[in-house]
Structure formats: C-alpha cells, structure tokens
Amino acid sequence: MTVAAVTKRNLIAMAVGLAMTAAASAQTEVNIVAFAPGFAWANLFGPSGTEKTEELLAFEKKEGITVNMEYADEETARQKVLLDLVNGTGRYDLVMLGSDGAVQTYSYAGYLEPLDGYLDQAKDYFDPSGVYPQFLDANRVNGKLWALPYYSFGAGVIYRKDIFDKYGITEFPKTTEELEKALQTVKEGFAKDGVTNISVLTMRGAPGEEPSLDLAGFVYAFAGFPAWFEGGAVTPEEIKANKAKPIFTGAFRDGFETFVRWSREFGPPGIATHTWVDMMNIYGQGKAVVLMPSAINGFAALGGTENKDVKEHTAFAASPVGPSGKPIQSFWTFSVGISKFSKDKEAAYKVLAFLTGKQSMEAFASQIGWPYNTFPEITHGPVLSAKWPKETLDTVEESYETADPHYFPYIPELNEFMDRIGTAASEAISGGATVDEVLANLQTWAEDRMTRAGYYK
Amino acid sequence: MLRDWRLRFVAPAILALAMVVFLPTGYLFWMSVTHWVVTDPDIYFAGIDNFSGLIDTHDFWNAWRVTLAYLTLSSALMLALSLGLALCLAEARSARVLRVLVVMPLVIPPVVAGFTWRFLLNSEMGFIGAFLLPSIGVRTSMLADPVGALFSVVIADVWSRTPFMFLIFLAALQGIPKDYYEAARVDGAGVVQEFHFITLPMLKGAIVMALLFRVIDAINTFELIYVMTKGGPGRATQTLSLFGWKVAFQGFDLGRSAALGVMMLAITLICAMIVFNRFLKVRE
C-alpha cells in the first residue's frame, strides 16, 4: 500500500469520526438553573447536584435530550435568571421561579413561554389533571399558565403538644384570638417556671421578601381579602380600571400589626433577622413551641433534629382563622418555567414535564419525606401514608383546598412589593420604627411606585 | 502618536483596560440615563429622571446616612487601631510573630468573615451572642437591634480590614530615619513629642493613602454586610451599595440602579479629591 493510500484512508477515517462527533453533539441540550442541590431533584442529579443518575440517563437516552443543570444558592440563582432573561441570552431553557413574584414579574414582562398549549404533550410525564389545581392556579397570571410546580406547600402550624398540654391547652386553637391567648398562657407559664431558653413562637422577620409570604397571609386572615389595594383589586387591569390606590395604612394594618406584635412579644430576640432556615433550626433544637404559618419549615426541622422531645411531641394543626373567618395563608410553589428565549421549547417542555411529573414527585416523597406533594395520589400513597398519620395528611391536603393562591395581588411589581413589605416588617419588629411609621412610609412608596408605573393615568 | 515606540508597547494594555474598565463604565453611564425597568416593556432615554427619582426617595437618604455612619465609625476605629498596632510592633524583633497574627484576617475573604461574625453574634448559639454578652447582662440580639447591627458590621469590618492599614503604616514607620528620633532625644523630647513632631508629620502621606483606600472600600462594601444582615434589621445597615443591589435585583429597576452606581462613583472621586487636597496641602 502506498503512503498516499494510507494517508487517504486516515483522512477518510478522521472525517467520519468528526461527522459522528458532530452528530452526537447535535443532540438537543436543555439547560436549567435552580437552587438546592441535593434537595431539588436529588433523584436525578445526586446528593451533590453534579452527577447524572441512572434515572436521568435513561430519560436522556429515551428522549435524545441532554439535560444540563446549574445549581446555585437561591439568591444567586434568582439573579442568574434575571440577568439571562433581561438580556435575552437564552442561556437557560428552564428557569427557576416562585409563585410569590418571579412568575408574575417575568410573565408580564414577556420573558416566559405560556404553557397551556403544551399541556397535552408529554402527558406520560406530567398530567395536569393529576395535580392539585391550586398549585397550578398559583402559577396562572391573567388566566394563562406560566410555570409548573415542583415542591409546594400550604399553611399550617407545627407545635409542641407536650408543652401545650403542660399549660392546660389540650386542643390547638382554631382562631387567631384563641391562639394569642394560648401563646400568652405559655409565655406566662415559662416565666413562672423560669424557662428562659425557649421562645413561644418562631416566625421569620428578616428584611426583604422573606416574611412577606406569611405576613400577607396574616393580612388576608384579618381583612378577609388581599387588602393591598382599594376594593381588593389584585390584577393590573382591576387596579387601572378602578384607579385603586394602595391601602397599607387602611385594611392592611391589622394583619401587619398582629404579625409584628406576635413576633416581638412571643418570638426569640433575633427574630427581626430570622429566615426560614432560622425558623427550622430554632424549632428543631427545641427552642420554640410554635412554628407558623409556613409549617413546611417545621417538617424540615423534624427531618434533621436529634432532639427527642421535638421528635416525639410535635403535632400539626390547621392554620388558625382570623377575625374575617378566613385562615392565615402561606402558600407557595417552587415553580419552573420555559424561557421565551429558549431555542427548543418543545424539548424544554418535555424536560419540564419530567422534572415536575409524577415520577419526580414520587422520588421527592421518598427522599425528602415531607407530607407536602403536588399530586393527591402521592399524598395518600404508600410512601407518605407509611410515614405520616392520615389525619396529618388530610389536614395538609385541606390546607391546599382552603387556600386562596391569589391571596396577594398578581401584578408585575409584586417582587418589589414583597421586598418592601418584608423590610418594613423587619424594621417594626426590631423597634427601629413603629408599625404606623413603617406603614406610612410603605404607603408613600407604593403610591409613588404605582404612579410611576402608569396605573393612575 | 503611535509613532512613539513606547506607546506601541503600552497600547495592548490600554486596549485591555478600555475593554474591561472604560466600556463597562460607559455602559453604566448609558444605563443611568435610560428608563429600563424589567416590568415595563418600554426602554427609553430618561435624562436625569433616574437621578432625581432616587434623590426624591426616603430610602436613598437613609442609605446615605447609614453609609456615612458606617464610613466614619469604621475609619476612625481602623485608623486608631492600625496606627497603634504599627507603633507597638514596628521595632521589636520579638514582635514578628505578633505582626503575622495581626495580618491574618486579611487573608480571610470578606464573605467568610461575614459568616463567621454572624454566627459569633447569633443570639441563640453564637459564642458572643449567646454566651459572652448574656453573661454581662446584655440579652439583646446584636444583629436584630438597629444600633447593635450597625455596630456589629463596623466591628466585623474593622477586624477584617485593619491589617491592610496596619501594613501601610508599618512600612511607612520603617521608612522614617532613626536619626530624627536620636536628635529629638538629645534635645530632651519625650515619647509624646516625638510622636507629635516627627512620627505624625512623616506619616501624613501614608495616612492620606490609607484613608483614601478606606473611603473607597467602605463606600463599596457589600458582601460583608449582605452576609451578616442583608441591610437589616429593616434598613438599619442598608448602605448605598446594598440599596443599589435591592433596586436592581428586587425592584428590577436597572436604570435607577445604574444611576446610583454613577452617584457612588462621583462620591468616591469627590472624597478622594478632598482627602488629597486637604492633607497634601497641609504637608506642603
């Protein structure tokens, strides 16, 4: 064989190899950004968030899609989503959202792909009829669906039954008035018994949007409606039509004031800086009697605590009802949506359906074990039924059914409002200003903000 | 101009600098005069609206006050501490180990320093917050009290950044000729007089430089405060840099956030000019 022939053969082999590589790399890629490695989709990306499990590899092979996950801490992930969408780079096909601001802001801004037209696809992964409708509703803006829910929760109370029993409270209070009396009873009991290292209540009061989900729930329970704008207007159209001004110094006040007062009177000294992590840790260490209204943090505490009393004597109760007759809300979905700038939205939806479908939620139930799930079938399925009493699962399910997912306005400016309201609460809880002072500032800011956004033209 | 052979060698560096400094700065200036809010599909030239809108807000002036308090407190403490340490550790050979210990906080990233101090001050489990302070009768959570939180971030910043000032003063002290002190002693000068008439005047340049770095650093400090308090409780530790972050990433108002960045740049330049003019004029 001549040198020329050998060279020619090598060149052909190289060309074929390159063509095959090109073909392989032409496989569709779907990029995702999210937070919580080792928690969110641990069944797919492993405890470190950097692996690809057999389950994920099987999906990739079957669908011809390569799934690339990028995890970051929550704040960083949110910033990556913002920068990617604002600049239209299309780096991420699927973006992590939340039903407390991101879904609203980005859908109104036109950065998300509406999902209604995709729901009939990939039904073997995600069947919308099998999901609690409230979790889908939480991701609807102006009637259109913009994201699918992953792990989600409703309101409730986690508390130490042994301590309640000790001070003569044998049944968990059903109203906020009764609960306040109960908290006071426990507080007085602690003072009499010289207990100084346990707080009666743990909630979250850190500046920013942290407390707002729960605080908005208090406002709703006291006013009986989302008392942010005149007439309870909750959409931009309603606000514009009625020129509905903010009412932070009006019907909003009672729920806000109660949240602040309970935090100051019954909460631990550092509550003005506490996040959900602090809530979880404080309860798990046995340093708080009641955790509310985002009870999911209590269940998270149970999963990690070594405290015997906390493990054996924790009970779950429905969220108490306010003076309006409506329960204190705390409702949230960790949602995922498709970026408008995704280059292959069909593939992106397939991955989204896989990530939020029954298979993923079954894995979530097995690995995490919380009584919260987006599928009724899994809530009452063998995994969760083996772990939790039926009464607990029924009460958790009832918290979804009695929830009003839209207990705060669904406006593009929601994220900023949540941040402002939470910061105002933190300021009042810390004693930096009175409730009326912070609400007056909030009112002034809100009126200016809505005027600038053109609502009152 | 490029006929000058020296400029030809420097040109690539200038080009690189232009790309990583001047272009982003130019883009910042453009954004600062643009109405660009994520919730609003319209992006348009806004003139000085972003600037006037910021100045009109209660939050801007609150952030300005907090920044001024933070800058003043931390700079004063840092100056006194670093100068004192430098004077004590400048000469003695046995102080070499101590000098290393003083400098150690400098190698710890501000984020790590912030987390460390946050845990130390935690009123439920921190060594300072849950044990030391209650033992002397202080039961308030430092980070949940508006004054306590500001004081806490100042202390954390002083701990983290004092070594840098210390090194500047140490180097400057070692550059002062010994003859001056010998001559002063011969004339009967005491320690205080030596410090007042020799050390301080000779250190003036170093003090100017140290303060200048400190001012720039303090105005731009973000990570330490963000990790410790996120600007809270409420807005008690919300400096201009944290306020700017909130405007961009919580309020989604990119134009206003850029305007605040331009204002911070201007404030830094003005402070630098004041420091240079005042201290160097006196020296002349």
Image (cartoon, coloured by chain):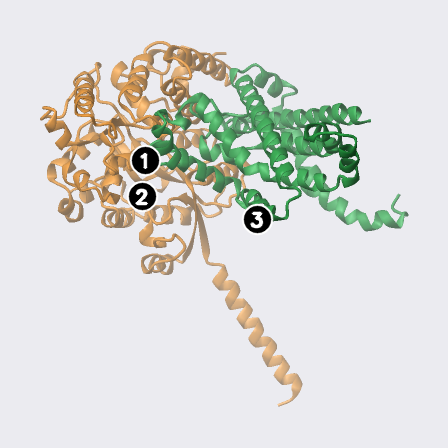
Chain colours: A orange, B green
- Same chain assignment for discs 1 and 2: yes
Q: Which residue is mark 2?
A: A120
Which residue lies at the image location 11% right of the left edge and 39% below the top edge? A390
Q: Chain of mark 2?
A: A
Q: Nearer the viewer, residue B251 or A270?
A: A270
Marks 1 and 2, how far apart at CA: 22 Å
Which residue lies at the image location 15% right of the left edge and 48% below the top edge? A382
Q: Position of residue B204 (x, y in %)?
A: 73, 30
- Same chain assignment for discs 3 and 2: no
Asked which secondary structure carries label 2, the reply is: loop
Q: Which residue is mark 3?
A: B97
Which residue lies at the image location 57% right of the left edge and 19% below the top edge? B54
The mark found on residue A333 in the picture is 1
Q: Residue furthest bottom?
A: A1
Marks 3 and 1, how far apart at CA: 55 Å
Asked which secondary structure carries label 1, the reply is: strand
Dot 3 amino acid type: Val
Q: Earlier in the sequence, mark 1 or mark 2?
A: 2
Q: Residues within 10 Å of mark 2 (few under 14, many from 20)?
A: few
- Same chain assignment for discs 3 and 1: no
